[in-house]
Image (cartoon, rainbow, N blue to C red):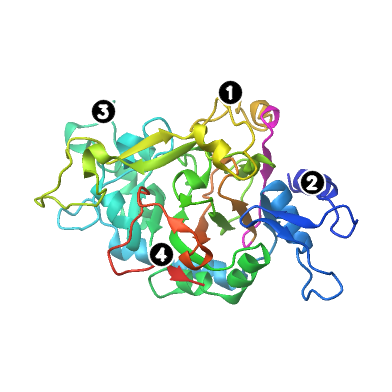
Amino acid sequence: MESERDEILAKLRQQVPPVADGSRSTHASWVRGPVPLPDPTTSNPPYPSPQCRFFDQHGFLYLPDFATQDEVHSMKTSMANLVQNEWNPEDPSSPHSMQVFRTDQQQIEAQGRSDYFLDSATKIHYFAETDALADSEGSDDNDKGKLKREYRRSENKIAALNKAGHGMHIVPGPFRDYAKSSKISDLLRELGWKHPVVPQSMYIFKQAKIGGEVTSHQDSTFLYTTPRQTCIGLWLALDDATLENGCLWVRPGSHRESVRRQFARNPAHFGESLEYCSEGEDGDGDRSQPQMIFRDITHRQNERDDGGKPNNISWEGKLPPNALPIPECKGLYDAGFVPVPCNAGDLLAFCGELDHLSLPNFSDTARHTFQLHFVEGEEAGVSWSKENWLQYPKGMEFMKV
């Protein structure tokens, strides 16, 4: 798979137009729009760099060995300790309730009606795999909705988790250190971000055998900014990511399509203010309504400076037809997706409008990743949508890098 990845990347590099061919006076930056090209003899370092040009042409960038093995080990060890000490969902006194995380057609039911999900914006909350829970079939009534017995042992409960998030970068330790490192800041500015801030971070476990698929989506659906989209995802492999254990698939060039959906706060639940009210607090919404909704915004594509490319696809929030089985994955290749297997420590950076997904983990080993999402801050003339699910408490700002 690595040889296939390298061959794909080599072909994509050939499609990146040169800077100094005299035919262009601007560079088409995804995050900034058309940027005048400086005199290459006076620009130091030259802009745009080869990495920046590849990123803006195809919507993603693969960076091998971005994190050291010490950083990888420190993050995995820290996560194991957090789970061991904090996540006790069987304990009724625990602040961490039993919640699952889904990206399929039941996503609104799982995340769209959950205070625990909304409250995770500035904390570390834990979300289990659906297949780690005892279901109605063949389970004792007292076990329904609880972890299956094989995951209840203290040393094995981490194997039941889908993800942890979304404020891991706020807590002192290896995740915060990595988020604030100079290599993160340098990369973001090389790719065109001027005043990046980090609204969310998460640790994905992609468990052996039960780690489910992450359906095709655009990150800007969930991390929406105005007047333009500015989200960038930094996807760090903490284990080797392969076709068998669910490596990332991306659709090169799809970042030139506009956002198709917005995961938005539901005014029927929150009221017109869209502000969160805890249980017992007064609000002008109907708390029986879902907190979040998916809003179709394909009509907004003409609001972009470039008009946006047509984005009438059938697999939004799903896997394309015939995505399985592996290794054929005919439906994915037919839809324009390519796999990007990684070694532990490798990084994938991608635009918020890029289509990406991952298949289930069919292997006997987990595939851990740590993910940061950045957007441009207000100093760049960009606003965080008040309709986004993730909202910090009043007076608390996103961390700058």
Mark nearest the camera among 3 and 2 is: 2
Q: Secondary structure at mark 2?
A: helix
**Crowding near pointer 1: few (<14 within 10 Å), some, many (20+)?**
some
Task: Report how far apart the C-alphas of labels 3 and 4 lie in the structure.
Answer: 34 Å
Q: For the point 65% across and 63% down, which residue is it?
A: 192
Q: Which residue is mark 3?
A: 136
Q: Which residue is mark 4?
A: 168
- The circle on residue 321 is 1
Q: Secondary structure at mark 3?
A: loop
Query: Given the image, on which type of amino acid does mark 2 rest?
Result: Leu
> Which stretch appears magenta?
333-345
Query: Given the image, on which type of amino acid does mark 4 rest?
Result: Met
The answer to whether residue 41 shows anywhere in this view is yes
Position above or below: 302 against 30: above
Q: Secondary structure at mark 4?
A: loop
Query: Given the image, on which type of amino acid does mark 3 rest?
Result: Ser
Q: Secondary structure at mark 1?
A: loop
Q: Is residue 59 left or right of residue 396?
A: right
How far across and down, in percent of the image, does residue 100 sit?
A: 33, 43
Position above or below: 276 against 361: below
- The number of numbered discs placed on residues in the rendered structure image is 4
Examine the structure image and report whether residue 48 is included in the region drawn in magenta.
no
Q: For the point 76% across and 57% down, which residue is it?
A: 26
* Among the two numbered marks 3 and 2 on one chain, the one whose residue lies closer to the N terminus: 2
* Among the two numbered marks 4 and 2 on one chain, the one whose residue lies closer to the N terminus: 2
Task: Report how far apart the C-alphas of labels 4 and 1 lie in the structure.
Answer: 35 Å
Position above or below: 20 against 107: below
Q: Is residue 228 left or right of residue 294?
A: right
Task: Report how far apart the C-alphas of labels 3 and 2 lie in the structure.
Answer: 48 Å
How far across and down, in percent of the image, does residue 86 sit?
A: 29, 63
In depth, the one of 162 and 37 nearer the eye is 37
Q: Which residue is mark 2?
A: 12
